[in-house]
Image: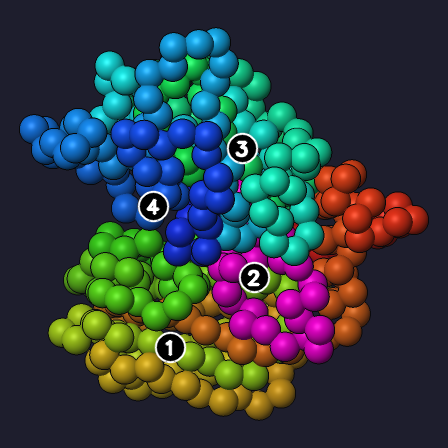
């Protein structure tokens, strides 16, 4: 498996991604491109325009050219790779595709996006039908929108845009934020088990709607316990811990504990370097637990231990980013802007020092 697919999907509908424009969507709606569920298909299901497809499908082109769709990333960031998924499109998939990116401030409309400074992330490349076509991207810039071009026409089930979130620092004017949130740049960096549910769902936006939208481990048959490690969106002091076991009733953990570490000065392998944020605490099934915590040292990473196993819907860590670290967040954002976007927000072309993020 290509490693970039383990990173968050920046275009995900769950993160607020959307398709803002397309030149054609005759057979299947453009919005399907960013759907979170795997593409489905029911043979022999016909609507007024033919077989129903779970994807974006344009009409048969009778003149030279290509079709296109513009996707707004739910979480702008640095793109590590894209997946052009043609699952279920067999005799009607496009033989080639390309992907471009742009960065813009605010909420541009389709006309403004058409005039944007677009950079090629994936050059025109061959596609396979009924397949997940993976393309690595090597570009250091933060993008807010992507444009998918297909040559000459056809259908694409999903566009996945995997990468690292780079949040806009104006979202945290006083440094207050959910330090673990995926949409702010939080990232799961390790876990003991994810048999029933991916741990990245712990830090997804919103409330879990079902048990399937949380993290759940297999049943343990030993004396150990399960755990997950989260790299915070920015170095900060955790001031509250929310452990949400909603929908987990007969399979919620009996207890949980949370520790933190500043990896800038300590090695995560050194158990003594981890400090307690929340001691081992009893949990209830199907409950949103909120625990205020006293002032603590700055953490860049946390480890959640659940005892002995089970499932959790969400982990929230409201806290405060120190002024110096907030400045580093601003610098990281500034350093990653594409040239055209940088000219919008930094007329002097100012660039700044390296931040702590790997």
Residue at point 38% right, 14% down?
A: 61
Please tell me the numbered disc located at residue 184. 2
Residue at point 16% right, 28% down?
A: 51
**Does residue 104 appear in the picture of this structure?**
yes
User: Label 2 neighbourhood size at 10 Å, few (<14), some (14-19), many (20+)?
Assistant: many
Position of the N terminus, as image quadrant, is top left
Depth check, mark 3 against mark 1: the one in front is 3
Choose between 238 and 62: the one closer to the eye: 62
Who comes first in sequence, dot 3 or dot 1? Answer: 3
Q: Position of residue 272 (x, y in %)?
A: 57, 71
- Answer whether residue 130 is magenta in the image: no
Q: CA distance from mark 3 to mark 2?
A: 23 Å
Q: Position of residue 213 (x, y in %)?
A: 28, 60
Choose between 68 and 180: the one closer to the eye: 68
Q: Can you identify the residue that label 4 sits on? A: 35
Who comes first in sequence, dot 4 or dot 2? Answer: 4
Q: CA distance from mark 1 to mark 2?
A: 18 Å
Who comes first in sequence, dot 4 or dot 3? Answer: 4
Q: Is residue 22 above or below residue 262?
A: above
Name the secondary structure under disc 3.
strand
Q: Quadrant of residue 84?
A: top left
Q: Can you identify the residue that label 3 sits on? A: 147
Q: Can you identify the residue that label 1 sits on? A: 243
């Amino acid at each position: 498996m290509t490693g970039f697919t383990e990173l968050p999907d920046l275009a995900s509908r769950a993160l607020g991604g959307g398709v803002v424009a397309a030149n054609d969507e005759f057979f299947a709606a453009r919005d399907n491109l960013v759907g979170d569920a795997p593409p489905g298909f029911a043979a022999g299901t016909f609507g007024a325009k033919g077989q129903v497809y779970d994807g974006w499908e344009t009409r048969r082109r009778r003149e030279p050219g290509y079709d296109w769709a513009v996707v707004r990333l739910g979480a702008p960031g640095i793109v590590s790779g894209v997946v052009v998924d043609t699952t279920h499109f067999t005799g009607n998939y496009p033989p080639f595709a390309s992907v471009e990116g742009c960065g813009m401030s605010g909420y541009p409309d389709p006309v403004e996006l058409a005039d944007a400074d677009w950079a090629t992330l994936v050059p025109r490349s061959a596609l396979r039908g009924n397949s997940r076509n993976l393309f690595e991207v090597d570009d250091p810039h933060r993008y807010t929108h992507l444009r998918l071009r297909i040559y000459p026409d056809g259908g694409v089930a999903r566009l996945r845009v995997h990468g690292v979130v780079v949040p806009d620092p104006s979202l945290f004017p006083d440094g207050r934020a959910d330090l673990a949130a995926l949409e702010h740049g939080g990232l799961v960096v390790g876990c003991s088990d994810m048999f029933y549910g991916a741990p990245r769902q712990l830090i997804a936006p919103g409330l879990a709607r079902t048990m399937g939208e949380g993290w759940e481990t297999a049943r343990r048959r030993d004396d150990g316990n399960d755990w997950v490690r989260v790299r915070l969106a920015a170095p900060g002091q955790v001031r509250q811990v929310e452990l949400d076991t909603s929908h987990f009733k007969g399979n919620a953990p009996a207890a949980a504990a949370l520790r933190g570490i500043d990896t800038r000065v300590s090695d995560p392998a050194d158990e003594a370097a981890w400090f307690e944020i929340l001691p081992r605490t009893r949990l209830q099934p199907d409950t949103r637990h909120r625990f205020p915590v006293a002032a603590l040292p700055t953490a860049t990473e946390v480890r959640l231990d659940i005892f002995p196993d089970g499932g959790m819907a969400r982990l929230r860590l409201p806290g405060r980013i120190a002024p110096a670290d907030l400045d580093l967040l601003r610098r990281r954002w500034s350093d990653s802007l594409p040239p055209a976007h940088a000219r919008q927000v930094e007329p002097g072309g100012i660039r700044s020092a390296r931040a702590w993020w790997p």
